[in-house]
């Protein structure tokens, strides 16, 4: 575990994040390593002014991937943030979105 955490001081944030999830045995549908605009996330969350203020110090947000039933059934498709959010509506979404800041 120490090595997985040490990666955050030596590797890219993307690589270290993936390494930590792998070390923890968390399977996920991978996403791109392209940063997302903060407003894209905050607008979808309908974030309050106080939440937006907390995000002021964050420079980049990356969507790592999605943990859901597909990952536990060894289906390792890639997924983008918009698809994950689109599927999040109603009672059909049962999963966890993973981000790195």
Image (cartoon, grey):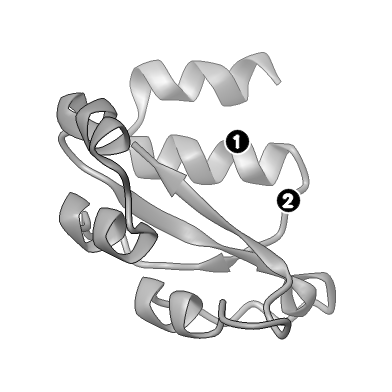
Determine the residue positioned at 28% across, 27% down: 54
Left/right placement of residue 35 relative to residue 70 reads left
Residue 74 is situated, as x and y percent measured from the top left of the image, at: 79, 77
Q: Identify the residue under disc 1.
A: 20
Above/below status of 31 relative to 53: below
Determine the residue positioned at 49% across, 76% down: 84
Query: In the rendered image, which quarter is residue 36 located in?
Result: bottom left
Residue 99 is situated, as x and y percent measured from the top left of the image, at: 44, 48
Q: Residue furthest right?
A: 73
Q: Tell me, for residue 58, which label it has, or none.
A: none
Secondary structure, mark 1, is helix
Q: Classify 10 Å Cα crowding around label 1: few (below 14), some (14-19), many (20 and above).
A: some
Tell me, yes or no, whether the two marked residues, 1 and 2, touch with CB atoms within 8 Å. Answer: no
Query: In the rendered image, which quarter is residue 58 located in?
Result: top left
Q: Is residue 28 visible?
A: yes
Give whichever of 32, 2 is nearer the camera. Answer: 32
Quarter placement of the C terminus? top left
Q: Identify the residue under disc 2.
A: 26
Determine the residue positioned at 48% across, 39% down: 17
Left/right placement of residue 68 relative to residue 28 reads right
Residue 53 is situated, as x and y percent measured from the top left of the image, at: 21, 29
Above/below status of 9 relative to 87: above
Query: In the rendered image, which quarter is residue 1 located in?
Result: top right
Query: Which mark is first along the chain, 2 or 1?
Result: 1
Secondary structure, mark 2, is loop
Above/below status of 78 relative to 26: below
Q: Classify 10 Å Cα crowding around label 2: few (below 14), some (14-19), many (20 and above).
A: few
Left/right placement of residue 60 relative to residue 100 reads left
Q: Is residue 79 visible?
A: no
């Amino acid at each position: 575990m120490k090595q997985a955490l040490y990666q955050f001081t030596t590797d890219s944030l993307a690589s270290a994040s993936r390494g930590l999830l792998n070390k923890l045995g968390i399977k996920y549908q991978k996403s791109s390593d392209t940063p997302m605009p903060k407003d894209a996330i905050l607008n979808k969350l309908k974030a309050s002014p106080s939440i937006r203020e907390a995000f002021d110090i964050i420079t980049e947000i990356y969507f790592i991937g999605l943990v859901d039933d597909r990952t536990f059934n060894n289906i390792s498709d890639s997924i983008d943030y918009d698809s994950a959010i689109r599927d999040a509506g109603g009672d059909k979404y049962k999963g966890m979105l993973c981000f790195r800041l």
